[in-house]
Amino acid sequence: MDILILFKNLFFENIIWQTIWLIAFIVWVIAFLHKKDKYLYMWLMIAQFFWIIHFFLMWLYVWAFVNIIWFIRSFIALKYKHIKEFIPIFILIYIFIGFLSYNNIFDILPLLAWFFGTLAFLYFSWIKWRFVLLICSFLWLNYNIIWNSIWWIITEIFMIIAGLISIYRLIKYKKN
């Protein structure tokens, strides 16, 4: 019962940004239900749009900016899959953001996740894409555990589960 009270208190801390987070989270999970990368990217862009709003309302402008970059990265991946020329641009942007927001050694985890995510989006596809994103989810999970970010721990656990289900479905689909 204490856990329900904790979740209730956390959710109602600010109902507007928590609701927007929940919408983004649901859309993110829906994205991974798709077998085709095209639809996955489109749903991810919708989720990223909601996360931009979520972080903006929380006054976390760096994270809102990161999600703007992710939105752009998803759009580029959707339109120009396997364009390696964009990879160094995104890596430089992430290094710059990482430099500006660096607090301690654990802040390298998001930087690594951004690096692998960029490779996943702009270089890999299908099952390899999802395997690389699993690496990203584990990096984010560790980062969120370190910072005691309950909602993002929940998000990454669901992302890992959705990623594993997605990989299983693609392998099963490939065999049929």
Image (cartoon, grey):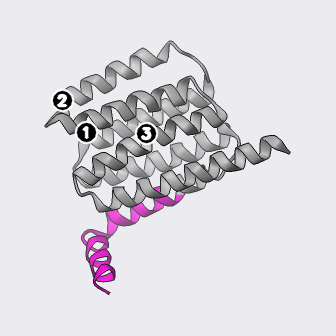
Q: Secondary structure at mark 2?
A: helix
In-front residue for pair 37/174: 174
What are the residue bounds of the magenta stretch?
1-26
Q: Is residue 7 above or below residue 173?
A: below
Q: Position of residue 42 (x, y in %)?
A: 60, 42
Which residue corresponds to mark 3?
A: 136
Distance from the alpha carbon under mark 3 to that under mark 2: 21 Å
Q: Secondary structure at mark 1?
A: helix
Taking the spot 45% from the left edge, 38% from the top edge, the residue there is 135
Which residue corresponds to mark 2?
A: 100
Distance from the alpha carbon under mark 1 to that under mark 2: 9 Å
Whether residue 96 appears in magenta in the rendering, the answer is no
Upstream in the sequence, badge 3 or badge 1?
1
Q: Quadrant of the N terminus?
A: bottom left
Q: Report the side of 110 relative to 47 (left or right).
A: left
Mark 2 closeness class: few <14, some 14–19, many ≥20 residues within 10 Å: few
